[in-house]
Amino acid sequence: SEPPISEILRDLEVDFIEAIAAAKGFRLAPACEPTGNHTEAFQAALSNVGHHDGWDEMMCNRIAETWRSRDPTNTWLDDKLLQVSETEQICGQVWHLPIFEHCLRGDVEGVARVIEDAQRRHRDGEGLVVKPRHGANSRLVYLWPPAGEPATAAAAELEEECGGDRLKAIEVSVKKALSGSDPSWDREC
């Protein structure tokens, strides 16, 4: 009998091949289309040479390229937004964590809408996450638990800076996520 890991890997490969075959009929959004650098990483993976050919290499390539290009049409949140709606359309139900609101930096009405919705959801007892459209290593990510529960470290620090006013801290977290940057993002991968 095969060891369990071999069975798992075989099943994953079969599922992966079926997913690729099913995906042939679906068009990628322009933000998701691979560039020349991605294609090189994919070719390395297919060559199975054992050097720069793993999933981690492809992931790091994607993270580095999308961050360095600063192309607003090529962000992971855009990919995710499309994934959510496309998956719901195909499957007839939502299979992702919902993304309630999003906007671009400089969209005054959009920013106000995101802040208002985040504060309303908090007042209604929901927990939520505020994060940048693109980023890595959890920088400028704020986890806001439902009212009455203690905030995580970054959120608690921001709440303290706002004089204990969690609604104000949620507003500030949205603004920081939209306009912030972190030096580590230039070094990722």
Image (spheres, rainbow, N blue to C red):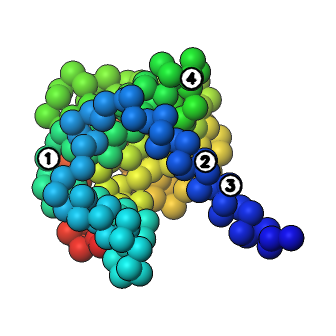
Q: Which of disc 3 and disc 1 is earlier in sequence?
A: 3
Q: In this view, does 61 lie to the left or right of 95?
A: left
Q: Which of disc 4 and disc 2 is earlier in sequence?
A: 2
- Which of discs 1 and 3 lies nearer the camera? The answer is 3
Local SS, label 3: helix
Local SS, label 2: helix
Quadrant where the N terminus sits is: bottom right
Residue 60 disc label: none
Question: Mark 4 is on which residue type?
Answer: Cys
Q: Where is residue 90 in the image (x, y as percent from the top left)?
A: 50, 22
Q: Where is residue 111 in the image (x, y as percent from the top left)?
A: 26, 30
At x 45%, y 30%, the residue is: 84
Task: Give yes or no for contact between labels 4 and 1 (Cβ–Cβ under 8 Å).
Answer: no
Residue 91 disc label: 4
Local SS, label 4: helix
Task: Give yes or no for contact between labels 2 and 3 (Cβ–Cβ under 8 Å).
Answer: yes
Give the Cα distance between marks 1 and 3. Answer: 37 Å
Q: Where is residue 37 in the image (x, y as percent from the top left)?
A: 19, 62
Question: Mark 3 is on which residue type?
Answer: Asp
Q: Which of disc 1 and disc 4 is earlier in sequence?
A: 1
Give the Cα distance between marks 2 and 3. Answer: 6 Å
Label 3 packing within 10 angstroms: few (<14), some (14-19), many (20+): few
The part of the image, by quadrant, that contains residue 27 is top left
Residue 71 disc label: 1
Query: Where 35 sits versus 56, above or below?
Result: above
What residue does disc 2 label? Answer: 15
Front residue of this view, candidates 54 and 126: 54
Give the Cα distance between marks 2 and 4. Answer: 17 Å
The part of the image, by quadrant, that contains residue 101 is top left
Q: Which of disc 1 and disc 2 is earlier in sequence?
A: 2
- Which of discs 3 and 4 lies nearer the camera? The answer is 3
What residue does disc 3 label? Answer: 11
